[in-house]
Image (spheres, rainbow, N blue to C red):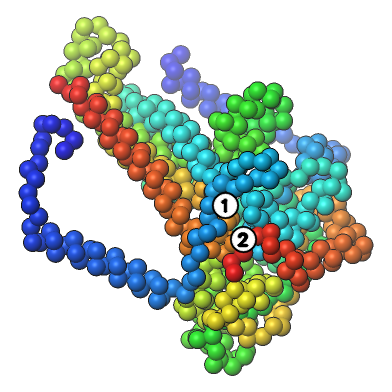
Amino acid sequence: MRPVKQLIVGITFMLGLLLIGSPVMAGELQQQLTTESVIETIMKRGKVKVGMATFVPWAMRNKAGDLIGFEIDVATKLAADLGVEIEFVPTAWSGIIPALIAGNFDVIIGGMSVTPKRNLTINFSRPYAHSGMGIVANKKLAGDLAWPDGYNSSKVTFTCRRGATSCTDTQELFPKAKLRQFDDSSLVLQEVVNGNAHAVLTSFPKPTLWQGQNPDVLFNPTLEKLTEGDESFGMRKGDPDALNVFSNWIMVNTSNGWLDKTWKYWFTTMDWSDQVDLKK
Amino acid sequence: MRTSKYSIRIRSAHLIDVAVISAVIGFVVYVAYRVDTVLVYNWYWGFIPDYVLRWDEEIGRYAPNLLLKGLFTTFRLAVWSLLLASLIGVIMGVMRTSKRLFPRMISRLYVEFVRNMPPVVFLFIFYFFISSQLIPILGIDEISVRASPTTLAVLEIAFGPPELLSNVISGIICLAIFEAAYITEIVRAGIQSIDRGQIEAGQSIGLSHFQVLRWIVLPQAVQRMVPPLAGQFITLIKDSSLVSLISIQELTFLAQEVAYSTQYVFEIWIFVAVMYFCICYSLAWLFGRVEKRLSVYRG
């Protein structure tokens, strides 16, 4: 046979194989669900792969370039409790859900708030943290605005990190205001500092942290929590075992107070600040 | 003044040259001055050396920190995807000039598919739909578990830390497939620039198709391909920053991590820009030398 012919026959044959596929018998389904669970993969591998993104103080790089933060503590304890090693997979936030679905890691522990829309694509555990959204604004631009009604105007510009819940929160709280989205959380702040945008919503403790770094330029119109979020582990759909294991790990560590204690350390104190080269 | 054949007479500067140069300098100074007034920013460069090289207390010597690690990964990405892209590009380029329809169709399809898509879109589609299935099939994760210490050491030098192996390899595959489409076109142009008479002459003295390619067409074509290839290789290095979007841990991605953590955004980006410039410029210089050497053999 000529090589071209061979190739065409080969491709047709492979396509045929794909079409036939393999039907699943009902009785085997339960067995299959268990063996295909990500928990089984983690135990077999002896390592849990956690997808996360850098976001102060959830996860950040210390002076040695290693990861530290609330999330890092949570994932490390989870791995220790399961008796496996841990591997962090730093991932760009805007692509973190596709990366989970593509199987780059087993679970997202990335301070991800549960939203109904996200929940259509992935499953969420019960929440392990409750962040609050706060506001920080430019003194020169927004100093005279009345809180909160003055901010709901078409003359006011907010910034947010693309794909973050702060974007939808801003739209809900200040529907008339303009919204500028960035991929980079540091640019979100810089726009406000530069005076190109009036204010930005971000999760605590950043509103106070950022204000402290730029005391002459920024101020907090209020220190109240504007919205409250529920942060959960994210995992692929169709995996009841994983959902059960992760949710119950969170339940146990909520009851014994470990999560609350760790949360307070990272979010209400700045004891960790000397580990990071944080901007003064 | 690349070759001695062409020489340019050096003239004294005209009035208009002086005017243009001073206008450019004036503009640069004005922009630099404006940056300081428009941008409310406290510049601080002192932390950068630590993120390149840092004194490690535990092992008692200097160890590369994030930025240098990222640079190494970018190097590895560039070198391997360059080799892979050249291989694919030469094969596809030769197919593109084939007399038979089927190979020509395949390579044409490939080139048009890749070239007519924005790089970022291609990266996302290729990474999530194809590369994420290819990597498990290759069993890369198991290699890093099962391999002997010697293999691991070799792998570490070639591809970086074993836990990032599949990450780096998917970056290499994505970049290579993308860049190879452009190399294909360069190879095709190189081959087609060879006079048909030479090929026919080769065939008439009984050389096979491969022999004609190996001894007549490619030696001359390669020489003509060097300048556009140099440009393409430099583009490849710059494009390697795009794979930070699919979370390949190279220079741009790690720089972003440092910027997020420290919030010294502009210092990091400017420093990284200088790093990229140094790599690309030295490559351009190197290719300039190669071109000069090759031109010696030109008849």
- Can you tell which quarter of the image residue A259 is in? bottom right
B276 relative position to A97: left or right? left
Point out the residue furthest to the right here.
Answer: A256
Identify which amino acid the numbered label 2 is placed on.
Answer: Asp
Which one is nearer the viewer's eye here, B9 or A1? Answer: B9
Q: Is residue B258 above or below residue A221?
A: above
Identify which amino acid the numbered label 1 is placed on.
Answer: Asp
The residue sitting at 47% across, 57% down in the picture is B269
Q: In the picture, which quadrant includes the C terminus of chain A?
A: bottom right
The spot of residue B75 in percent (x, y) is: 48, 38
The residue sitting at 57% across, 52% down in the picture is B50
Which one is nearer the viewer's eye here, B39 or B155? Answer: B39
Residue A161 in view of the camera: yes
Residue at mark 2 to residue at mark 1: CA–CA distance: 10 Å
Q: Chain of mark 2?
A: A
- Can you tell which quarter of the image residue B298 is in? top left
Does the residue at mark 2 contact the one at mark 1 (Cβ under 8 Å)? yes
The spot of residue B190 in percent (x, y) is: 26, 29
Residue at which label 2 appears:
A277
- Can you tell which quarter of the image residue B248 is in? top right
Residue at which label 1 appears:
B50
B268 relative position to B24: left or right? right
A124 relative position to B165: left or right? right
The residue sitting at 47% across, 75% down in the picture is B40
Local secondary structure at mark 2: loop
